[in-house]
Image: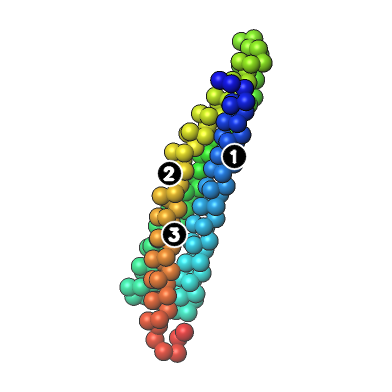
Amino acid sequence: MDAALRGTAERALERSLGHQRWRVDGEKVIATFAFGGSLAINATAWEAGATTGLWPTVGVAVLALAAVATVVLYMADRIREPDVTATLARSRREGWDAAKTDLEFFRALYVRVAFNEHVLRTTYVLTWVCVSLSVLALVAGSLAMLTLPAGRS
């Protein structure tokens, strides 16, 4: 591969790697805030006395599912960067010249960016599962508060 072309491709891959990390971190923030908002509404409903009936129970169940989905989202974050140390150690061990070492760095970067695309698809789906469950818990908590007897809210 031409050196100029490889340099351009490497810069594009590095930008992609940074974008991938930014995207997964942003998805985790969105899911966490959605869960926190629904938790606040449900906690307010429980504090106001909405502890029995359909809506508080639904709110707790869906909130528990949202909590599990949020934890799974955090565990699914497997965005990885190329292992520079391993490539350098292999280069030294096998006696590569600078051109071969540079090519292996490029290959490692390409492999990681390609792998991270699968992670992005997984975390995208999990994020929307988390947000959907959090919205359902938010609705259930709000309905629990609205169904409180007069004078208890």
Q: Secondary structure at mark 2?
A: helix
Q: Residue at x 47, y 67 (%)?
A: 38
Where residue 55 sits in the image (x, y, percent)?
Answer: 36, 73
Q: Is residue 79 above or below residue 138?
A: above
Q: Earlier in the sequence, mark 2 or mark 3?
A: 2
**Residue at 58% over, 26% down:** 5
- On the question of residue 80 being in view, the answer is yes
Residue 121 image point, x, y percent: 43, 44
Mark 2 to mark 3 CA distance (whole Å): 16 Å
Residue drawn at point x = 67 percent, y = 16 percent = 98
Q: Amino acid at mark 2?
A: Arg
**Residue that label 1 marks:** 15
Please state, as top left, top right, bottom left or bottom right, where the N terminus lies in the image.
Answer: top right
Q: Nearer the viewer, mark 1 or mark 2?
A: 1
Q: Which mark is residue 121?
A: 2
Q: Earlier in the sequence, mark 1 or mark 2?
A: 1
Pointer 3: what residue? 131
Check contact, mark 1 vs mark 2: CB within 8 A.
Answer: no
Q: Nearer the viewer, residue 134 or 151?
A: 134
Label 1, residues with CA under 10 Å away: few <14, some 14-19, many ≥20: few
Choose between 5 and 12: the one closer to the eye: 5
- How dense is the environment of label 2, judged by Cα within 10 Å: few (below 14), some, or many (20 and up)? few
Q: Position of residue 88 (x, y in %)?
A: 65, 20
User: Callout 1: helix, strand or loop?
Assistant: helix
Residue positioned most to the left:
54
The residue positioned 47% from the left and 34% from the top of the image is 115
Do callouts 3 and 1 mark residues in contact (Cβ within 8 Å)? no
For the question of whether residue 83 can be seen, the reply is no
Tell me the amino acid under the disc marked 1.
Arg
Toward which corner of the image does residue 62 lie, by quadrant? bottom left
x, y (%) of residue 45?
Answer: 46, 75
